[in-house]
Structures are given as structure tokens and as C-alpha cells.
Image: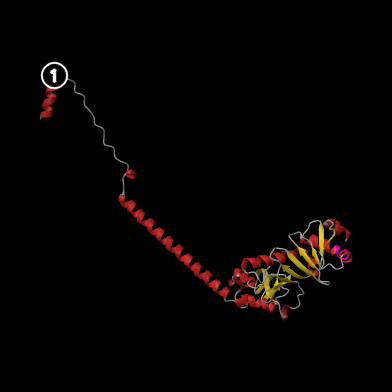
Amino acid sequence: MSERRHLDDRRQRGLRIVPVELPAPVEEAPFLRPNRRTRVRRARRGWMWRSILLLEATGGALVLTVALWASYAKVMASERLRVGNVEVRGSHFLSEGEVRELLGPAVGENILGLDIQALKARLRSSPWVAEATVARTLPDTLRVEIRERAPLALAELDRLYLMDGDGSLIDLYGPRTAGFDLPIVRGLAGATGEARRERAGRAGALLQDLGELAREVSELQVEDSGDLRLVLRGAGEVVRMGPPPWRDRFLTFLGLRKELSARCPEAEYFDLRYRDRIVAKGRERAIVGPPAPAAGEQAGGR
């Protein structure tokens, strides 16, 4: 009633009435409406599928692991892969039987299960072995290559020991090693520890430097001063040497040996520590020998 009265009042006053149309309500598209139920169902379904895929992958990995383990066990149990042959190269003093003994239980074991580094360590535990390599050759062969230490002298300690160029002791000198005709190194028994190793290393270095000329040496004395005194084979002359070069000076002396013997028939001791001369000493007096020629000159004259 109030609205109609209000309209009548406006007509009486002469006011124009303009009808106003309200916009129709916009209906939201169905696909824009949230559907929580659908989302929950899809999330649950995705989780289930992921769980199923994870179980399938885990099961497949387990089956593969079991198959690999079964194959590995079968291979490791194969009689064809048990070590039956050992090929040894580079061994001159050690026999093949001694090398097999150093390898321990490797013979008869599966070749794929062997620890190669451990086998090398077992071989190097022998003082005769300087270096060793071990290789597998399927199905049942081990290839062993050895580099043995080369004895250069007999070190006099409590007993005689074979010694190499590094001053390392290799083995006792006895019936088994009596075939080695080597110079005797003296002056080691009075030293211990590092001092003895240093003296032995110095003697070994001199003999290595002399090379084939070392066969002229019968004995080698390492003195407290650091000098080296050689007793030669044959007439038994004593040659005293200081620091290197040893080979050049010794080669020069050998080239003048007959001349020195003729000029100094009573000389028993020759000092090669000087650069340009050889001092020859007899029982009562010292004689200065002729100047030593250069190593190249002496080598050219021989």
C-alpha cells in the first residue's frame, strides 16, 4: 500500500516514473563449480595406483636380486673355475713350488673370488721378491710374474747374509746359496738400526755403480769416516775410495794397475780419493803415482 501511495503522489506532482530493470542473475557454469567429492575420489585413486606400482617395482627388484644371487652362487660353486694351474715367470732362484706355497690356499679356490692384492702381498712377503703381479686367466689359471732381488754381496753380521744393491738382506748364506760368488761387506756388525742400513746402502750403491767391474772385488769394508775400502782379487791390493763417481775412478785404476805395479812393486795400498792422482803406499812409505787420466780418455785407450 505504501508503495502504491508513493507512486500516486509522484504522479500527482508530475514526476516521470522510469521503470528500472534489474539484471538477471548469472548462472555459474557447471564445470566451474567446485566438486569436492570428485577431487577426493581422484586423489584416493592416484594414491592407490602409486602404491600398486611401488609394490610391483619392489617385487620385480626382489625377484631380480634373488635370480642374480642364485646365478652368483652357481658360478662360485663351479668346479671349472677352481684354480688348478699356476704359471710363474721371472723366478730364477725361487722354485715354482715355493711360489705356490707363498700363494697359500689360492690353489683350489674359485678364481673369481680371489683377492689379487692379498696374493701380491703374500708374494712380496718373501725377501727374494722385489715386485710381483698376479692375473687371472679363465677358467682356472693364475699367471704370476716375479722380479727377484739380485744379490750383489755377502753382508757380514752375526752370520753371512745375501745382500742386494739397496742394502736389503735377502737370505742366509749356506748350502742352498753357496753358488753365489760375491764380495763380502764388512763394517756392518758394529752398527745398528738406521746407521747399519745407511752403511749397507752405501756399499750396495758402490757395487751397483761398478757393475761388471765388481767381480774384481773380494771384500768391501765400510769405514766410520764414510770411506769404502776394497780388497781386490788376485794380488789382494787395497783400494780406498771416497764419494762417487766410483766406476770412473776404479776403471782408471784398473787401466794403470800394471804400470803402478811396475813403478811401485812394494805398494799394497792405493788411495783413489783424489781427483787427479793415485797415491800408492807401501809398508814404509807413500808413493804418488802418475796423474789419473780423464775417464773418457782412459776408456778410449782401452
Q: Amino acid at mark 1?
A: Arg
Give residue 266's position: percent from left, percent from top: 85, 68
Side of 301 relative to 103 (left or right): right
Give residue 22's position: percent from left, percent from top: 24, 31
Q: Nearer the viewer, residue 248 or 270?
A: 270
Regarding residue 50, the answer to whether it shows in the image is yes
Q: How is the image coloured?
A: secondary structure
Task: Tell me the residue that label 1 is attached to.
Answer: 13
From this view, report whether residue 11 is shown above or below residue 291.
above
Side of 49 relative to 143 (left or right): left
From this view, report whether residue 156 is shown above or below residue 274.
below
Quadrant in the picture for the N terminus: top left
From this view, report whether residue 98 is shown above or below residue 10.
below
Quadrant in the picture for the C terminus: bottom right
Q: Residue furthest top?
A: 14
Regarding residue 90, the answer to whether it shows in the image is no
Q: Could you tell me which residue is drawn at 37 percent across and 57 percent down?
A: 45
Q: Secondary structure at mark 1?
A: helix
Give residue 10's position: percent from left, percent from top: 14, 22
The secondary structure that dominates the magenta segment is helix
Task: Let me know if residue 247 is in the magenta part.
Answer: no
Q: Which residues are magenta?
A: 255-259
